[in-house]
Every structure is written in C-alpha cells, then in structure tokens.
Amino acid sequence: MSFLVLQNIKKSFGQTQVVKDFNMSIDKGEFVSFLGPSGCGKTTVLRMIAGFESPSDGTVTINGKNQNSLKTSQRNIGMVFQAYALFPNMNVFDNVAFGLKVAGMAKPDIESRVKDMLKLIHLEHLADRYPYQMSGGQQQRVALARALAPKPQVLLLDEPLSALDAKIRVSLREEIRQIQRQLGITTVFVTHDQEEALSISDRIVVMNAGRADQIGTPSDIYNRPATRFVASFVGTLNIIEAIVSDPAANTIRIGDNLVTLREPIAALKNGDTVSIALRPEAGSMSETAKCDTMLSGKVVSSHFLGSVIRTKLDVGGSQISFDMFNSPDAALPQPGELVSLRFMAHDLLLVRE
Amino acid sequence: MKPSKILAWTAIAVGVIYFFVPLIGTFEFSMRMRRGEYSFDAYQSVFADMQFRSTFGFSMLMALFTIILGMLLIVPTAYWVRLRLPQMRPVVEFITLMPLVIPAIVIVFGYLRLYNSSSWIPFTGSTQGTNILLVFSYITLSLPYMYRSVDTAMRTIDVRTLTEAAEILGAKWPTILFRCIFPNVMSGVLSGAFITFAIVMGEFTMAALLNRPAFGPYLQLIGANRAYEPAALAVIAFAITWLSMGLLQIVSRFGKLAPSRP
C-alpha cells in the first residue's frame, strides 16, 4: 500500500490554475524528486503536502490518513528549505532541539536525540555555534538534522541545494541520500536541476505547466522520455524532423537516409512528419562501433570540450549534435567533411507532444 | 586638499557650531549658580527637588508602559502585515504616520472630547483612567518610530520561511511569535523602545492637557519660575536622550550580527 498519496490534486491562485489534476503514489522509504522548470507547480505540490497551501480540489493522504483538514503543525512532516531557515537567535543545539521541545519531550531525551542527529550530520563539534558562524553547507546540514529530529513520517526537501556552491552541492546531495537510506524515511525532493534528480532519486516526476508529464525511474526518464517536454528538459537531446516513408515497415526518411524505427508507426500515413529524438552520446563515428543504423551527413562544427568532443552534423537539413569521448589519438572532424553517424535503432525515440 | 573636501569640512564645522555652541552655553550657564565660580549647585537643587523625582519617576513609569503595550501592539501587527496582509502595508504605514501630521494638541482635544467623564468611555473620570489614556496617547505619538524600527528589523529576517519552519516543527502561533520572531527583531524593538523613551520623557502637550504630573510639564514650570535650574534640566534632558541614542547604536550593532542568510 502506498504511504503518501496525492489524488486529483488541483490548485488555483485566483484565475490561474497552477496544479492541474496531479496524481501520485509514493511508497514508504521511497525517494521521489519533483523536477521541472520554475513555475511548473512542483513547489506548490510540496507546499500542499506540508499544509502551507490547501488544495483547491483533491486529497493528500499519508499512511492512510487524509491530511486535508490537518494544520501544518499537526502533520508530523519534516521540511528543509532552500534558504536554510535556521532560527538566527538559537545555536545549533537549540535549533535541532526546537521541534522536540515543542513536542514536550523530556530534557534528557532531547539531549540524547539532538546528539544523535548532530552525529548523523557529522557536526557534533559545532553544537554551540550560531547560524551566522557557519557556512551554507553546514547550515543546511543543521536544517536537515532539525527536520529529522522529531522523527517525521515524511521529509520534504524544497530545493535545499540551490543556494550552495557546486562542490558542496554534490557532496551534500550524496549525504542526504545516504541519510535518507539509513533512516528509510519517505522523501520528496523538489529541484530544477536534472543532474541532482537523476543522481539521487528512486523515481522522478517531471512536471510541466502544473501536470506530471512523466513519472518514472531516472533511467526511464532519461532513456525513454514520454513527451517532447521531458525529452528536451532532461539531458541534451537532438530533435530531428523526419518524413514517414513506409508506415507498415516502420521506416522514415531523414534527408537521404532511410531509417527503420523499433516503435510501430502504423497509425501514421506515408508523408506525415514525425519528430525523432536521439541522445548526443548514442552515436559514434567509429566504423567498429556496434550499430544497426547509420546517418550520413556533413560536419558543421566540432568542439573539443575536455572529456568529450562535440560535433554537429547536418543531416538533410536537420542539425544533429553527438559526443564522443576524448582520445589523444582522435582527430577532430573538420567542417565540411562527410561522415557517417552510427547508432542502434532502439536509440531513436518517437517523440509525442 | 581638494575644494570638495574643504566644502565638506566647512559644512561639518558649521553644523557642529550650530548644534554645540548653544548646548555648551546652556551647560556653562547651568554651572553659574554660585556667584564668581563654577559649581553644580543648579544640578543639586534639581535633584533635591521632590517634584523632579516624582515627575521623572512618573514619566519613566509611563514610558515603560508605553513601550510594553506599544510593542505588544506593533510587533504582532508588523508581523501579520508582512506575513499575511502585504496588500495592507500602505494603509498601515499611512496610519502609523498620522501622528506626525496631526498635531499632538489636536489629538489630545479629540481624546478629551471622546473620553471625558460624561462620555461612554469616561477615561478622564479617574486618575487611573487618565493615566491609561496618557499611555495610549504616548503609544500613538511613538507609532511612526516604533512601527518603522520593528518593520525594518523584520526586513532583515525571512519572516515567512522562519514561520513556516517553526510551524512544520509543530509550533503554534504564540511559540512562533515569542520564540522565533520576537528575539530576531529585538534590535528593532529596542531601537523603537529607546526612541519612545526619549519622546515620552520630553512630551509636554498630552501630559499638560490631561493634567498629569509628568516630566515635560515640570520642565515648563521650572523654566517659567527659576533661573539656573532650567538650564541644568535641559542638560539632563539632553543626557537622557543621548544615552537612549547611544544604547540604540549599541543594540543596532549587535543586531547586525544575527541574521543568517544563504
């Protein structure tokens, strides 16, 4: 049975509907990321789970109990905010102890729980520090400890890494995931950073204009995007316009190249235009590469980016980027050079709107 | 030295002379009570006066009540406007500025008309009631300064997120307000308190027209009947104000250490 269920959730602010019929079931101990651009409604859904916003329609259920009528303070949810939100007048110990004191826990129990939490985030030695005496990464770890201290049934993370620098971001996201696994706490993570979502989630919800465009594992989302939006938002993707050549044989034409798709296109007519997606890392120029499909084109540009070489090809008017790993012996393809891009047919994805 | 710097220093010098020469003159005059030599006789005379002690004590008490009640009114109001009613902000700002444009004498005549002994709420019918009315009128007078100092302090913290952080940890409104918000706007609260204290200690119109034995009317009475003591009282009044301002500066400096931002 699902632990956290969002059923037919809708939310409007005045005339604007920011969340449209959102449905999602999250299992106990699962780590789910809401991924999407600014204004897609991901934070609004999170805030409805927390109780800061009331759904215009639909229900939020946690562990079988409808939460709609409960106030935020009654939901037993932990939350970490983008801006840390540590109480500036309290030191680390008092910040972590705040929820426990509010719950009326006995002093010795509070002390032991706070110590456990500080140990969990490796900041036992900073118990007496005030927020302004700590770095952003340390403050956010304290915020995580504070959220976890009262043993919440669900942990909500509202872009907790956005205000941190790149290195701290990577180390802290790994730490968050490790703590989440250790405690087995059901977690909802909101981010607009696809790398963050792909690297730490059990499942990802890609949100677009108030709807969940796709819900799936990171691998599903990346390798099998369900819509054009998901395909373009997650990772870099080539969208190629092609003409249906023979629907019964699943063949399409890209410039002068005839390509057979794995996905059936029998519903389409000869001459219809379709959008096909291809990841830049799927192709190779090597003649020994494992492939069953080939596209011929002219090199437009080629850039050395350190670990990879990014080459842009013109194939029948469509520009296709592809990446190949850097090798000291590899020669940079020259503009105007005619080359063949080899890949497996199953790497070509039919994009739906 | 550049001409612009010379101009700046000249302006500062003129300002210093304009403000300090009368003050030094007053101080010098207050020391001349004993013929032929400087002494603190005028100050001794002032401090020995029972009326000075009682009026000073009365005004101190009024200032204390004004500060406590004013803060209990203003902190939750500023908090609520910032959190839930941002659209009401211009209205509240306008209301809090009104005591600056309406003369105190107009306000006190309004009070006397509304709260006289034959009205529905006869505040002036008793000493206690008049004292309460005086505290309320002082709160009104200090509104522009109190509201602004508290509101400015609230601007330095993320009120909404701190409230939400406390709320999700199970805290209820009194806990949020008094344990999470109030301590973080303490610098603003104290700034407002010191300004209020200075205002109340020197206020004349309200206290005189409500016929209360406050420090302001006492200053006026001594000024009309004595020679050296008014000068000594003026210096004392300045000292009180400067002490308040000094404390305000110290508090503001401590306040700057508190906010934690990403």
Image (tube, rainbow, N blue to C red):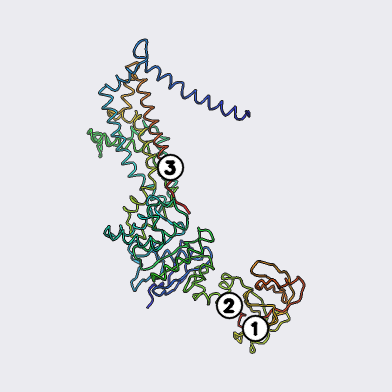
Mark linked to residue A290: 1
The amino acid type of the residue labelled 2 equals: Arg
Asked if B197 appears above or below A214 in the picture, the reply is: above
Towards the viewer: A220 or B56? A220
The amino acid type of the residue labelled 3 equals: Phe
Tell me the mark number nearer the camera, choosing from 1 and 3. Answer: 1
Q: How many marks?
A: 3
Label 3 CA crowd tier, 10 Å (few <14, some 14–19, many 20+): few
Label 1 and label 2 in one chain: yes
Residue A172 % position (x, y): 47, 63
Label 1 with label 2: CB-CB less than 8 Å: no
Asked if A322 appears above or below A160 in the picture, the reply is: below
Q: Is residue A94 visible?
A: yes
Q: Which residue is mark 3?
A: B94
Asked if B193 appears above or below A212 in the picture, the reply is: above
Residue A95 % position (x, y): 37, 55
Q: Which residue is mark 2?
A: A352
